[in-house]
Each structure stands twice: as structure tokens, then as C-alpha cells.
Image: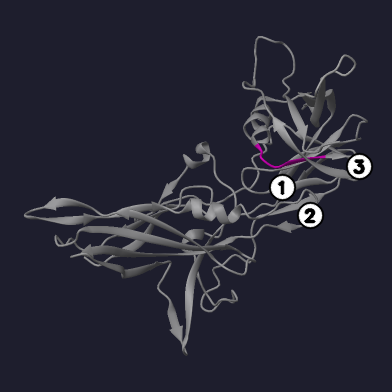
Amino acid sequence: MAQSISLISGSPFAGCPIVYSVQPAAYDGDRTFHRIIVRVYAKLENDDDYTTFDFSNPVETKPDGQSFVTVASTFDISSALVAVADKYEYDANPTFPKRYPYIKFRVEAWDEWMIDGVVSTNQNVVYWPSAPTTISGTTYDFYGYAFMGAFNDLERMGTLIDGNGVEYLNITYLSRKPNTSPEFVYKSTPFIYPSTFASPGRSLGTTDAMSDDSTPVFVSGAPTDGPKSLSHTPSAVGSATVGGHVIYAVDKPTNGYELRFVNGMGCLESINVTSFVKKEANIHTEKYTIARRETLKKFSRTMTVKNDDKDAWTLVSGPLDEAWASWYIHEFLKAQLVWIKVGSQWIQCHVMPEETETIIDQEKAQPMKVQFKIELDLVY
């Protein structure tokens, strides 16, 4: 049986499983060992060079009459794409609109075995999305692409299956903010939101043949657009709908703060909090004894070293309905990249959630709110 490679489960997001099935070469009892090697070539859209990642699995067999047959091996290559995506550096205050780069990649797979102490490599090489094509002496490789971000488990439950049994899930939105009630924003303050975006069909199945300078050669399947964040500055108090978000602009209070964060789908968003609860400074003190030869008038002394005087602020969201409380807890509090505006500066900070956060408590007759702590990534 000839070797083959096929995508069996995947979405446009690099942070979700992207699984390939590789069929090994036919069984041969003379082989001491037999394994499949999968190599991924991946880079961010604007990088100069590809990074290679190798995966391997021993080939499994199953009985088939008087002999054996090889069993297809599966490989999840999403970790390779995430490793490339992690090189991208987000900025709290980029030039808007801000389009995020896609990840360009291709996959090769081959057999490797040993017979009588001789190792044979690169046997029966197969390619995804397609084998290279040579035109006028120049060889062109085909590529697929993916975006930074991931679906959560609840969204992945909506996975579709095509006629060939392949699992897929397309991007239909880039923000998880609910529209059950308006989001309060500040007048004359930029409101940052991801653009509405729908991946063009089966993104991982749409491919380009591209030369090394990323110029499309055959089909125009690579994304000319993609996930991006936009900015809207309300000029008056009142409600509006911006990019599918229902907002209500109010005058910025003296205790109002702007925060920006990278959501789980890889896009920059903003929120405004209008309450300030507590401000603390965490200073760690370490004591050391300075030992010296003592006399009646000279003594050993203790020295203290103080460090990590980072401010920790406790903020509160303001009144929320249940959907917004759930969003704060499951999306914002889990964000890894967060900035807060202090004066005219955007300062990176870390959200420090409690071990248990209450979404709704029907025993208390009061509006829901989410209280959270941030630690400024800044030493005074």
C-alpha cells in the first residue's frame, strides 16, 4: 500500500488540534524497526525563514490473515504552529487597523526503517497540501495557513464533519463579548474591538503554491485579509452598535481605567472599569547578617534587602448580567497579555484571579459584579 498523508481534523486556529493521518508503507517482516517521520515547515507571514519541527511515531501493525498490515499513524502538529505564533509580539497601542499575521506552513512525511543493520530514510515521501511542482526549472512548494488563537472547549463541541469524515470548524467571530446588555465605554476614549471576520471556507484545505518570496503562483487561496483589531472613539454620550458590539458611551469618571488585552482568539480588545477599590504595594524584604570580628564596641549587624515593589490594584467591573459576568471570568481573567493605561502610558500588568470566582449568587439581592486584582509589571 502506497504511503499517503491527509488532514483529518483541524480549524484555522493554530491553538486547536490540527491532526493528520499518515499511512505507512506496506508491512515487511525483514525490518528491525519501522517508523513514520513528519516534518513541519512553518513561519509567521513576514518571517524570512521557516522553522522545522519533526514528529515521529513507531509504525503499528495488525493481523490480516496469515500476515500483517500497517496501521495509519496520527500526528497533531498544532504545537509546532503555536511555537511559531509565540514569536509574535503584541503591542497595547498599535496603529489601527491592526492585522495580525497568519502562519504559513507545509507538511512532509516519510518512512524510516532498518534492515540488516542498514537504516533507510526518506522513503516514500508524501506532502501536504500537495507535492512540489516544477515549472521552467523552478520548484514551487504548496502551503496552507492558520491564524493565532484557539477555540475553547464549548466552541469545539460545534465541530462539523464533512462527507469524507474530516472534522472542521470555521471562524465566524473573533470576540466572545456577549450582547445581552450594552457594554459601557468612555466618551472620547478609543474602544478597541476585533473586526467581524469569517474564514473563507475550509481554511486549512485552501492552499497556495508560493515561491520563496511568497508570491502566489497558481491559486489565490492564501489570506489577503485576516483577523484584525479596529478602533472606534465615541464622540457623544449614548448608545451605538460598533462592529456587532452594542456599546453605551458615558463620560469618563475620575476613577475610570482603560484596559486592553489579547483575547483567546488572538485579537486585541479593550474594556473600561469605573470603580477603584484598593491599591497595594508588594515589597519583599530579605534579611542578611553581616558577620565581622566583634569587639566590645563593634557588633555584627543585620542588613535588609527590599525588592519587587510592584503595585497591586483591586478593580471591579461594575454591574453585570450573568452573561457578562461569565465573560469576565472565562475570558478576561484568563488573558495572558493585559495592559492598563496610567496617565499617558500603557503599562503591562497581570490579572491575578482568586481561586474561586462567583458568576452568580441568587442568595444576594444585589447586582452582579466581578472584582479582580492586577499586578503592574513595573518596579518603581
* Res. 236 mark: 3
Asked if the residue at tag 1 contacts the one at tag 2, i.e. Cβ–Cβ closer than 8 Å, the answer is yes
Judge the density around disc 3: few (<14), some (14-19), many (≥20) Cα neighbours within 10 Å: few
Looking at the picture, how far across and down is residue 210, in whole percent?
Answer: 53, 75
Q: Which residue is mark 1?
A: 268
246 lies above or below 6:
above
Regarding mark 2 in the picture, which secondary structure is present there? loop
Q: Would residue 37 appear left or right of 225 to someone viewing this image?
A: left
Q: Would residue 311 appear left or right of 44 to someone viewing this image?
A: right
Taking the spot 85% from the left edge, 34% from the top edge, the residue there is: 257
Asked if the residue at tag 1 contacts the one at tag 3, i.e. Cβ–Cβ closer than 8 Å, the answer is no
Q: Residue furthest bottom?
A: 136
Amino acid type assigned to the residue bearing label 1 in the image: Leu
The reply to whether residue 307 is in sight is yes
> Which portion, as a residue range, is magenta?
335-340
Task: Tell which circle, 3 or 1, labels the residue nearer the N-terminal end.
Answer: 3
Regarding mark 1 in the picture, which secondary structure is present there? strand
Amino acid type assigned to the residue bearing label 3 in the image: Ala
The quarter of the rendered structure image containing the N terminus is bottom left
The reply to whether residue 165 is in sight is no
Separation (CA) of disc 3 from disc 1: 24 Å
Q: Nearer the viewer, residue 54 or 265?
A: 54
Q: Which residue is mark 2?
A: 94
Q: Nearer the viewer, mark 3 or mark 1?
A: 1
Regarding mark 3 in the picture, which secondary structure is present there? loop
Task: Tell which circle, 2 or 1, labels the residue nearer the N-terminal end.
Answer: 2
